[in-house]
Amino acid sequence: MADTPNSASRKAPLAALAGLATLAALAALFALGAVTVGSGSHTSAATPVAQAAEPELPGFVLQAPPVNEGPLRYDTEYPTIPYSTGARMDAVAALVARLNRGDVKLEYRAPRGYLDSLLAALNIDPSSQTLVYSQTSLQSRSIHPSTPRAIYFNDDVYVGWVRNGPIEIGSQDANLGAVFYLVDNTEGAPPKFSGELTKCLACHDSYSLSGGGVPRYIVGSGYTGTTGMLVSHEGWILVTDRTPLKSRWGGWYVTGQHGSQVHLGNMKIKTMHDFDDLEAHRVGNVDTLDALFDTKPYLTNKSDIVALLVLQHQADVQNQITRVSYDTRTALAAAAAGRIEASEARERMAEPVDELLKSMLFADAVDYTAPISGDPAFVAQFERRAVRDSQGRSLRDFDLKRRLFRYPLSYVIYSAAFDALPADAKKMFYGRLKDVLRGADKTPDFAALTAADRTAILEILRATKPDFVQATAN
């Protein structure tokens, strides 16, 4: 998936499609660089709606800009964070060490190759499967509505599988942030893990390596055609908890029940006239994908709606944690070297800490207007990892009636990446969090938190997060 700064409100599909009229206009429109254009010819807006055989829309594939394979920008921008040279300490690096010692062995099994045993070795449950059919990844040429890319995940690792291609992995390193791997998935040879830098960071960087970015995960949504190619540049957005459901999951398959709420999942745009009546093309409230394509090669016949909600939230918070880590470590190093004052270092920390607090407290998250339900297997395995207080409450308890979780503070607060944040950043975060939960912080961003929400979250943290108690003792 690739990067664009568009917001959910910028949806003008017909205007955007006018930009598809010529290749030159497409190249000018698309700021990410090279564009691959699919077959078919564009039909003008003046053509009558009723046509016997209207050509399908051309599409484009999100591609990364060319990258310099020389020294990584992070090496100079964040000298305290050895992204390209430091030892990786994430779950995948640990698995590679176990493989090298012979403690574990991955088995190749058709039709998915090493995928099944890799997921088992990483403790990733198959029920986490989500499927994306838009051509928005490294292996875009192999992705199609009939052969979607599968993504499986747990709290720290995301595994992408495309049929007949290498396995893609994004993994959260507590100190480096998102790190990336490719795994050879060829029968007859041991799986080879390669750590990736510029090939993946060309997209998985906040600013596509143009400077000032950090490694991150991407969850996007865009109008997708019948071949898997995007058909509207303006319609592609990055998704957060604030994104209305009606704008989410374009280019993704979605299974599960969501009542009268609508989304863009399961939809394929064939002609520009489909935009005149999107409601007629929406496909929702389906329990399996068996009627949409051949699901037999995949681990399940689902792309679970609850898993999609969790995937998006978790990735967003992890991105914010990485931003806080990079900015704080860089500011503190500059202050220690005398290049900036300590007060300026605190100011540089404050904004990313505030954004992280908003994400973790679901500030401005959209309310659900109908109950949501998905695969019980995903819910069960997710809640099994809960840290609970004496009353049995956990930040992993789902609500799914009007919001994602019953107690609206992100469970990612228990992650190794959060725990590894610099002490100054955590102290600032915990201080702000305590003020919000005790009602001292009247910032409008947190107005949706009820008194009961604040009390419950505070009690859960005091029972399950010792460093929060220590940091907020005074």
Image (cartoon, rainbow, N blue to C red):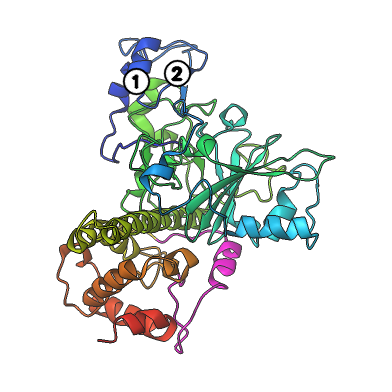
Tag 1: amino acid: Leu
Say few, some or many: other residues with alpha carbon within 10 Å of mark 2 (under 14 / 14 to 19 / 20 or more): many
Residue type, numbered disc 2: Leu
Question: Which is the main secondary structure of the residues drawn in magenta?
Answer: loop
Task: Count neighbours of disc 1 (C-alpha within 10 A) and say few if under 14, some if 14 to 19, many if 20 or more.
Answer: many
Outermost residue on the bottom side: it is: 390
Q: Position of residue 27 (x, y in %)?
A: 37, 16
Of callouts 1 and 2, which one flags the residue occurring earlier in the amino acid sequence? 1
Quadrant of the image occupied by residue 19:
top left
- State whether residue 363 appears in this view: no
Q: Is residue 294 left or right of residue 331?
A: right
Whole-number angstrom distance, CA of label 1 to CA of label 2: 9 Å
Q: Which residues are magenta?
A: 371-399
From the image, which quarter does the C terminus lie in? bottom left
Q: Residue 395 location, x and y as percent?
A: 43, 73
Residue 129 appears in view? yes
Question: Quick check: is 390 in the magenta stretch?
Answer: yes
Q: Is residue 399 left or right of residue 28?
A: right
How far from the left and from the top, in percent, is residue 218?
44, 44
Q: Which residue is mark 2?
A: 57
* Numbered label tally: 2
Say above or below: 130 vs 148: below
Looking at the image, which is closer to me, 131 or 292?
Answer: 131
Q: Is residue 440 left or right of residue 207?
A: left
| Residue bearing mark 1 | 17
Position of residue 266 measured from the top left corner of the image (x, y, whole percent): 50, 39
Q: Is residue 46 left or right of residue 124?
A: left
> For the residue labelled by badge 1, is the local secondary structure a helix, a strand or a loop?
helix
Q: Are marks 1 and 2 in contact (CB under 8 Å)?
A: yes
